[in-house]
Structure formats: C-alpha cells, structure tokens
Amino acid sequence: MASRSGQELSCPLCSDISKEPVFLSCNHSFCKDCLHSYWAERHSPECPVCKRRASKGEPPFFAQESQCKPQEGAAAAESEPLCSLHSERLSLFCVDHEQLVCSTCRDSETHSNHRFKPADEAVQDHERKLQHLLKPLKMKLTLIHQIKGNCDQTAEHIKVQAENTVQRIKEEFKRLHQFLDEEEEARMAALREEEEQKSQMMKEKIGALSREITALSDTIRATERELRAKDVSFLQNYKAAAERVQQQHLPDDPELVSGALIDEAKHLGNLRFNIWNEMREMVSYSPVILDPNTAHPDLVLSEDLTIVRQGKTKQQLPDNPERIDHFISVVGSEGFDSGSHSWELQVGDNTAFSLGVLTERSPRKGNPWSGLWRLMFCNGEYKSLSPSDTGSDVSVKKKPRRIRVHLDRDRGRLSFSDPDTDTHIHTFSHTFTDRLFPYISTWSEVPIKIVASKVSVTVEHHS
C-alpha cells in the first residue's frame, strides 16, 4: 500500500487527523471509532465517502505506523475519486449537469457549451445553497424548541395553579366551616339558656304550688280530725278549728304558665335562611374578578383576584396566548356583550394607572390600542385614550380616591366618575361590536382594589 500524506490521513467524518486510522478496500481512510459509529448508525458496512459496500465480514485494514507518516513523492490524489470514464481526477463541476467531471469530460461532446467551475469553488457555492436551504429548517427547529419549552413551563405551571387553587378552596371552606361551627354553637347556647331559664321558672312554679298544697293539706287533715271527734270534744275544739280554717290563706286559682315551653319556632324556623342572612357579614361580592392567566408577569394579584399591583420582580409565567405582554395590565375574567355594568376601583395614592375596557379580539401580544378605551393617570395628569384618540387631556379638579367605571353596552357609552363626590370625569361614546372586558393597568406598587358590592337578602311574598 502506498504511503499517504497527513492531509489524506485526516478523517472525513470528524475532519481531524485520523486516530487509529483504518483503510477500507476502496482505499478511503477513517478514524476507527468514527467508522464504527457510522456503521452502527446506518446498520450498513459501507464507505462513508464512495458508499461502496464492504463484503460481508470484511474487516477494515489497519494502517501501519510507517504508513501514517507522510513521505515525499507520494501520489497526492491516490485517495481522491477518479472519473469512471477517463480515470482522471474530478477537478471540475459542470453547472448545467450539476456533476463532477474531469478535464477530458469537459472537452467532450456531452458537455459542449456547458458552464464549468473548479470543484472547490462549486463546493463553496453548494455549501452556501445548502446552508440557505437549511436555514428555514433551523428556524423552524428553534421555534419548535421554544414552543416546547413554553409547553413544559405551562405543564409545570398547571400543577402549581392546581395546588394553589386547592389550597385556597380549602382555606375558604375552612372559614365557612368555622363560621358554621360558631353559628351552631351560638344557637345551641341560646337554646340551652332558654331551656335553663324556663326549667328554672317551672321549678319555682312547681315549688310554690307544692308549698301551697302542703299548707292546705295540713289544715284540711287537722280539721277533718276534729270532725271525727266525740260530740263534747268536737264542741270544745270547734272554735279553735274554725279560726284555723278561717285564718288559712287561700291562694289564687293556679294557672298554667304561658310561654313556658321551648320556642322551637324561634330556633328552627327558617334556620338555613337566617344563617345565610348572617353570612352577609363574612362574605362579599366583587363585580369584577381579575383573570390571572391574562396578567402581565410584572403584576401581582391578591389571592381573591380583586387587588392588583406592580411587583418588584418579573414572575416566571407561561407565555400563553391570553397573557398580555405589552402593557403591564390585566383584564377581568368575564366579558360583557350586552346590558349595563358598573364597578368601582379604589386607586388611593396610586400615581400610574389606566382603567377601562378591552375588546375580546384585541391582540394580547404587542400593542392592544386597536381595541382599548381607557382613562389614564400619569405624572399628575389625566388623559383619555381610545383607538381613535392617542391622548386627550381630561380636567379633574380633585384626584379621586375611588373611580367608578360604568359600561352601558347597549347604548355605547363608557363613563368614569368619582363616587365619593358624584362627579363626572369622562365619557366615551362608541358603537361597540365586540365583547368587552374590564381592563386595569398599573406601573406602581400601590395596589388598586376592586371595591366589593353590598350583599343584601330580599324576600318576595307571593299572593
């Protein structure tokens, strides 16, 4: 076997000097491990360069140490592929046929008037073309990796959401159970107190009657003994007996005590309704519940989803399609496509916020202005903004602590007012065609709270 240069002993698979070089019968050389890995991946003992298949059981020939050393005068192109027609080096590339050719092929009739490039130049051109063709695949692969990463994050977040929600539900039911336990104990205590009072009253009544019975019985028995005496003896004691009977106190006719029994109606009547009515003190109703799945990662929501503020650090949340990523904002969980709706927001000392409504079809990624109507307060100034107005000054004499938002969906009006002074702030007029969601944006750590509505219980009487 002829000696080979160090360049020719580089492995085509790893592009490095061959380690433990081996030669196939086609005279191509590779690293031993590279060749075995190549064969294992393809389950076929073929040459990685010329694709010549080794005969069954054909082992690679190991190069001798002397063969690994470059020697002068070695045939430089011995391992290069040759033209199958002319046994010459394939040094040219026919652009028209897109194939390697030798110099003799170039001058043949087959390639008459064809364009040719040096093989190394054609390699560079085709590498660039292949890289260009590969670019969309790489971009798609990157996108799929990103989406998969987001899906992995979403799957983990679902577990966290479920655990947190379970814990909050348990805490709410624990409060309800505690209220019911305390309510039950209070009603049982009231029943025991009534039982004790009425039992004591009856005990005293029975005691008084028993004493009257004893006194009358003693007088009657003593008088009856006198009546059974002899004539003379009876007459002798008559006067004393008559005086004793006359002096005996006659009590009023005894009467049954009114209201002596337990007032079962008071304790049992409308029991569940009365307990429900008592629960008004511990329950509240929020006209708007914020949707945490839409909240910008910079926002922090309260456990009951009625308070929002800007956090100090960005939260690691899934970039789900519903989540807003442009403004630091959040929308309500329920949208309105008809009717009249009002909600109040306690803004307090917050100095950077926007309040309003966002359409259902407004983009959640990027700028949502195309479907957003809002009143903004920033740098001490109020402005109104809408799809048709990038910002108009709104005059407010006194900064409100609370702001009422009123949406009349059917009449196409969105109004803002100060409920504490009953002062109108601004009104948008627009023919809304899409479902509208309450919208809150704040870039301040001072919380904005949705004010709870008063809960009342009414009873309707049917004739």
Image (spheres, helix red, strand yellow):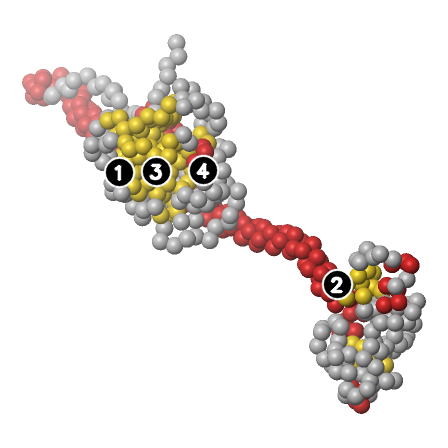
Residue sitting at x 72%, y 80%? 17
Q: What whole-number distance in Å separates the C-alpha atoms at marks 2 and 1?
A: 67 Å
Mark 1 belongs to which amino acid?
A: Glu
Q: What whole-number distance in Å separates the C-alpha atoms at marks 4 and 2?
A: 50 Å
Residue sitting at x 49%, y 48%? 161
Q: At numbered mark 3, what does the secondary structure look like: helix, strand or loop?
A: strand
The residue that mark 1 highlights is: 381
Q: Are marks 3 and 2 in contact (CB under 8 Å)?
A: no
Q: Is residue 243 left or right of residue 421?
A: left
How would you rate the neighbour count of disc 2 (Cα within 10 Å): few for under 14, some for 14-19, many for 20 or more?
A: some
How would you rate the neighbour count of disc 1 (Cα within 10 Å): few for under 14, some for 14-19, many for 20 or more?
A: some
N-term-proximal mark, 4 vs 2 = 2
Q: Nearer the viewer, mark 1 or mark 3?
A: 1
Q: Nearer the viewer, mark 2 or mark 1?
A: 2
N-term-proximal mark, 2 vs 1 = 2
Q: Is residue 426 left or right of residue 208?
A: right
The residue that mark 3 highlights is: 354
Q: What whole-number distance in Å separates the C-alpha atoms at marks 1 and 3?
A: 12 Å
